[in-house]
Image (tube, rainbow, N blue to C red):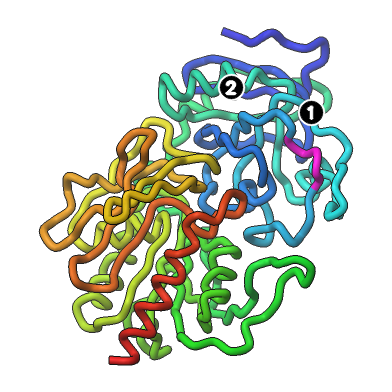
């Protein structure tokens, strides 16, 4: 079936079940095929589009005012947009924000990302929630020429995220140092000039603001590629190891990441902290399992409860896979759960400073309820050195 088409549609979104949406295209022209998800955040569309965890996904924004504040290089989570495409309700207006340096449309065109506006995103979101995240093909042609059958066939023929290792596509090519701290008024970004802890961050698709939070917590950060071995990690003589966020199927990335993490855990007493895909990597290394979710969690308004304190944090999330809490072995405890659906949002080893969370404590966009996790990591490193 087809959605009501405008008089001159310049973009087309085709789902694998044959549903077709027409709208107004902006950004780059051409075609892209990916998994379609939705994000409920009211701010931070630029951070979302540049979050490496969105590799292989087209993002439907449920909030209608997308593009109104333009873009600025300060808000990039990596060099260029990583999400495959953008779906919005209303076409972006001219940017109105003192920080803006470029219009969203021009930015998407320059960086090669396709977008479609004029879509009933409420209807689309309901379909994703009810039927699961579909495979989709998104095309933008200023002349409005679309081979709908070919687009539907492309969506149906896409292999999907299960079994797909995307961390190797978004990780850094070589190691580098990071000392930039979180943005603060009025200075903006400042540098960590007196770090107290040496941290190796394994990059499965790390967001810049996670690295900034580590630096703000007193860390001297060295970032290594996703394929780094335990020997390469330990060669830096770190006080702690951080496992970053990232895209794709954790079981696929785990083929090379899990052996490294197991060696770190078996041969050292280093504190280990993981976020998002890093959380899933740690769970796999400890003997747990991960599962594909129906439509995942994507937004900046997700309530998460910490079992030990009863505290509820409003968090930023982006994940389509989850750790199966029932698979966690003895000696590994569940520390956080989602209050939306009860899914796992955190684990820890009993008696050791090894822990991880599914949500994003760097929370940009979003509140800062979970920054204590970075401070906890720094405290664990300080305690180890003191003993």
Q: Position of residue 265 (x, y in %)?
A: 24, 75
Residue 45 image-quadrant placement? top right
Q: Which residue is mark 1?
A: 91
Left or right, 166 with respect to 286, comes to right
Task: Name the magenta segment's main secondary structure.
Answer: loop
Asked if residue 69 is among those painted magenta in the image, a careful observer would answer yes
374 and 1: which is toward the camera: 374
Q: Quadrant of the C terminus?
A: bottom left
Q: Quadrant of the N terminus?
A: top right
Q: Position of residue 4 (x, y in %)?
A: 69, 8
Residue 168 in sight from this viewpoint: no
Asked if residue 357 is among those painted magenta in the image, a careful observer would answer no
Q: Position of residue 176 (x, y in %)?
A: 57, 80
Query: Which residue occupies 47% across, 26% down?
Result: 156
Q: Which residue is mark 2?
A: 14
Identify whether 160 is placed above or below 384: above
Identify whether 221 is placed above or below 149: below
Q: Secondary structure at mark 2?
A: strand
């Amino acid at each position: 079936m087809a959605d009501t088409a405008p008089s001159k549609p310049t973009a087309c979104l085709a789902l694998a079940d044959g549903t077709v949406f027409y709208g107004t295209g902006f950004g780059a022209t051409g075609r892209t095929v990916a998994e379609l998800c939705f994000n409920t955040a009211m701010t931070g569309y630029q951070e979302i589009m540049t979050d490496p965890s969105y590799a292989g996904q087209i993002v439907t924004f449920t909030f209608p005012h997308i593009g109104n504040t333009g873009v600025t290089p300060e808000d990039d989570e990596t060099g260029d947009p990583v999400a495959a495409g953008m779906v919005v309700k209303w076409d972006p207006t001219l940017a109105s924000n003192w920080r803006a340096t470029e219009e969203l449309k021009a930015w998407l065109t320059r960086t090669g990302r396709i977008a479609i506006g004029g879509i009933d995103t409420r209807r689309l979101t309901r379909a994703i929630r009810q039927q699961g995240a579909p495979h989709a093909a998104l095309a933008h042609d200023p002349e409005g020429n679309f081979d709908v059958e070919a687009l539907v066939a492309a969506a149906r023929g896409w292999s999907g995220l299960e079994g797909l290792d995307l961390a190797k596509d978004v990780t850094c090519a070589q190691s580098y140092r990071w000392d930039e701290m979180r943005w603060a008024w009025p200075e903006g970004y400042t540098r960590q000039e007196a770090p107290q802890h040496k941290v190796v961050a394994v990059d499965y698709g790390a967001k810049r603001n996670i690295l900034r939070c580590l630096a703000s917590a007193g860390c001297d950060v060295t970032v290594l590629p996703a394929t780094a071995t335990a020997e390469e990690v330990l060669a830096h003589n770190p006080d702690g190891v951080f496992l970053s966020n990232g895209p794709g199927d954790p079981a696929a990335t785990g083929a090379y990441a899990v052996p490294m993490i197991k060696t770190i855990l078996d041969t050292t007493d280093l504190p280990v902290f993981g976020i998002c895909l890093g959380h899933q990597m740690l769970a796999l290394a400890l003997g747990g399992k991960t599962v594909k979710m129906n439509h995942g969690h994507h937004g900046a308004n997700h309530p998460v409860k910490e079992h030990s304190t009863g505290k509820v944090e409003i968090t930023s999330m982006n994940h389509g896979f989850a750790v199966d809490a029932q698979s966690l072995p003895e000696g590994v405890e569940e520390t956080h759960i989602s209050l939306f659906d009860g899914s796992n949002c955190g684990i820890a080893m009993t008696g050791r400073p090894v822990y991880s969370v599914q949500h994003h404590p760097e929370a940009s966009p979003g509140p800062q309820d979970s920054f204590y996790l970075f401070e906890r990591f720094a405290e664990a490193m300080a305690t180890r050195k003191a003993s």
